[in-house]
Image: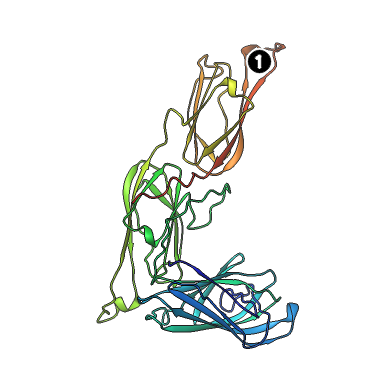
């Protein structure tokens, strides 16, 4: 999707949700006031309050939003997004497909008003109710592609929203190469007129998918690297007129990236011994952790989903040194613990030797921004 440009709804504040479904919305200010995006780029949005009534929780308004294509090329999709205030709700909307996720609202063109020639515009509207708060709008279309490289999330949250991974790619990243290690995730965000992906390569699994042609919603897909290998992720644009008889002459655009997936070091990117007891370790998703302890330490038992045990040998009571290899597959924090044990601790009359614990605290984060796609 194109670079977003922001617009503040002047007087009445705007908020929206699914058409005819209770969501969150409202406005404040005088009837007829308007505000427009004045930034350079391919999309401009203007909000006009046609009417308003009441105040506070009983407030209501009718708002019309004009979306214009200010780029030099034709746009085939557009979207307007904003953050909704608490206590806001929707009564009805028209001429756009509107959806919400938490406090985020998105209005996407309907099937008949997404194609805008340079300088052309279209309008959608809504009836709103709720408290008075002025949100900030972002407007984008596919006439002007993003100029920036995809950013890599550094959030330490253990939950990942759809389309947002350890590494994220957008429309501008077509024909690039992406390098992942097993356990990492790849988020893909494309405009609504791109088809959802179809991939059967066993090295990746599709965690979530939403939008894409013909839903009218932006395409958001999240993949996870689960095995070693190389693959091509590819999709293309589509439109109802391409399936008419006879089909229209609209060009079809291909989007492709090349993905290389490798296992992290089997020797352990991070190595720990008995001397590291009670220390804190920070690692990135995809990295491995190798623990080497003397023969009398029990093998590890681990239930935290952020860290998986890839292999384990030795430890009490095998009389072999304990060697365990872990891999970080999700963000989070945990304690990695075991106990020093001896046979006499299990005699009918146990020996006085205490169970000696070994513990390290592990923080797992998403990879740093240096792991971005290479062109």
Secondary structure beneath dot 1 equals: helix
- The residue that appears at 70% across and 11% down in the rendered structure is 351
Tell me, yes or no, if residue 261 can be seen here: yes
How many residues crowd mark 1 within 10 Å: few (<14), some (14–19), many (20+)? few
Residue at the spot 40% in from the left edge and 72% down from the top edge: 214
At horizontal 42% and vertical 36% (from top left) the residue drawn is 264
303 in relation to 37, above or below: above
Q: Is residue 194 left or right of residue 317?
A: left
Nearest the viewer among 203 and 11 is 11
195 over 37 or under it: above or below: above
Residue 305 in view in this figure? no
The answer to which quarter of the image holds residue 149 is: bottom left
Front residue of 340 and 278: 278
Q: Quadrant of residue 126?
A: bottom right
Query: What is the quadrant of the N terminus in the image?
Result: bottom left
Q: In the image, is 326 to the left or to the right of 172? A: right
Q: Position of residue 153 (x, y in %)?
A: 51, 51
Horizontal and vertical percent position of residue 7: 56, 74
Residue 240 at x, y = what percent?
A: 34, 77
Colour convention of the picture? rainbow
The residue wearing badge 1 is 346
- Where residue 141 appears, as percent x and y from the top left, is 43, 72
Q: State how many labels appear.
A: 1
């Amino acid at each position: 999707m194109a670079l977003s440009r922001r617009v503040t709804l002047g007087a009445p504040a705007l908020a929206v949700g699914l058409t005819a479904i209770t969501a969150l919305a409202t406005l404040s200010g005088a009837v007829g006031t308007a505000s427009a995006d004045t930034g350079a780029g391919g999309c401009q949005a203007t909000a006009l309050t046609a009417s308003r009534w009441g105040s506070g929780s009983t407030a209501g308004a009718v708002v019309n939003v004009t979306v214009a294509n200010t780029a030099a090329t034709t746009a085939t999709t557009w979207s307007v997004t904003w953050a909704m205030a608490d206590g806001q709700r929707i009564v009805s909307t028209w001429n756009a497909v509107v959806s919400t996720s938490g406090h985020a609202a998105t209005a996407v063109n309907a099937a008949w008003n997404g194609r805008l020639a340079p300088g052309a515009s279209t309008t959608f509207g809504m009836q709103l109710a709720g408290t008075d708060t002025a949100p900030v709008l972002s407007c984008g279309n596919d006439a002007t592609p993003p100029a920036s490289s995809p950013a890599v999330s550094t959030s330490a949250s253990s939950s990942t929203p759809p389309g947002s991974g350890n590494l994220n790619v957008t429309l501008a990243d077509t024909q690039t190469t992406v390098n992942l290690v097993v356990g990492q995730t790849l988020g893909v965000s494309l405009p609504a007129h791109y088809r959802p992906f179809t991939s059967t390569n066993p090295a990746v699994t599709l965690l979530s998918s939403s939008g894409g042609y013909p839903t009218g919603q932006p395409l958001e897909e999240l993949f996870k690297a689960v095995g070693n290998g190389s693959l091509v992720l590819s999709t293309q644009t589509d439109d109802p007129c391409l399936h008419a008889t006879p089909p229209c002459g609209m060009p079809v655009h291909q989007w492709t990236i090349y993905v290389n997936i490798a296992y992290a070091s089997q020797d352990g990117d991070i190595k720990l011994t008995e001397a590291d007891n009670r220390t804190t370790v920070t690692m990135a998703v995809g990295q491995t952790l190798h623990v080497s302890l003397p023969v009398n330490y029990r093998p590890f038992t681990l239930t935290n989903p952020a860290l998986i045990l890839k292999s384990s040998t030795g430890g009490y009571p095998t009389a072999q040194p304990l060697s365990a290899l872990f891999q970080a597959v999700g963000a989070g924090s945990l304690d990695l613990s075991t106990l020093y044990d001896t046979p006499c601790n299990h005699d009918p009359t146990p020996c006085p030797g205490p169970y000696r614990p070994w513990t390290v605290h592990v923080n797992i984060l998403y990879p740093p921004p240096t792991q971005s796609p290479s062109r």
